[in-house]
Image (cartoon, rainbow, N blue to C red):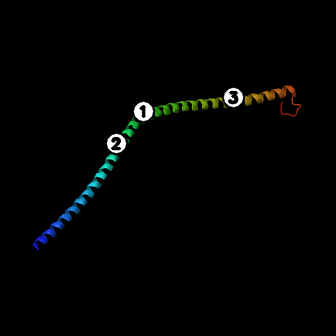
Amino acid sequence: MPRCNAATLLCMHTQALHMCAACSHEKEAKAKETIQQLKMEIANLTRLVEQGSGLALGEESTLNDLIKQKEELVRERDAQVDQIMAIRAELMDTQVRGSSQRARVRVCVCMCVCSGACGCACP
């Protein structure tokens, strides 16, 4: 019987080793798959970082150009607003002077033409 027990123990030990080996192979396969996925992810992220950093340099230059253009356009706009305000003030003066001149012309025409005969308030 000692041989049977030894054989049984040897058989059980062999089965345990096979189970451990199978389990190890499974874990190794999963680890290799995870490593491969992580390598792919690292490659993708590296590519994205390289693209992102390349774009950032170009974008920074473009951004600076746009800021300069904006500042120039703001100065132009402010100058045009000042011009518009001056033109409006001049227009208002012209309208006031025109109204006053039209009133004088009406009075003059009325005085010259009708001399108060039309019922107006001309002297």
* Residue that carries the numbered disc 1 in the rendered image: 61
* Residue that carries the numbered disc 2 in the rendered image: 46
Residue type at mark 1: give it.
Answer: Ser
Q: Nearer the viewer, residue 95 or 72?
A: 72
**Residue 94, labelled with which disc?**
3
Residue 109 to residue 26: above or below: above
Instruction: Give the left or right position of residue 104, taking residue 72 as reference.
Output: right
Disc 3: CA contacts within 10 A as few (<14), some (14-19) or many (>=20): few
**Element type at mark 2:** helix
**Element type at mark 3:** helix
Residue type at mark 3: give it.
Answer: Thr
First in sequence: mark 2 vs mark 1 = 2
For marks 2 and 1, give the CA distance. 23 Å
What is the x, y in percent for residue 46?
34, 42
Disc 1: CA contacts within 10 A as few (<14), some (14-19) or many (>=20): few
First in sequence: mark 2 vs mark 3 = 2
Instruction: Give the left or right position of residue 91, taking residue 8 as reference.
Output: right
Image quadrant in which you'd find residue 81 = top right
What is the x, y in percent for residue 120?
85, 33
**Quadrant including the C terminus:** top right
What is the x, y in percent for residue 109?
83, 27
Give the residue furthest to the top.
112
Q: Are marks 2 and 1 in contact (CB under 8 Å)?
A: no
Foreground tag (2 vs 1): 2
Give the residue furthest to the bottom.
1
Who's the residue at 46% across and 34% down the image? 67
Residue 62 to residue 10: above or below: above
**Element type at mark 1:** helix
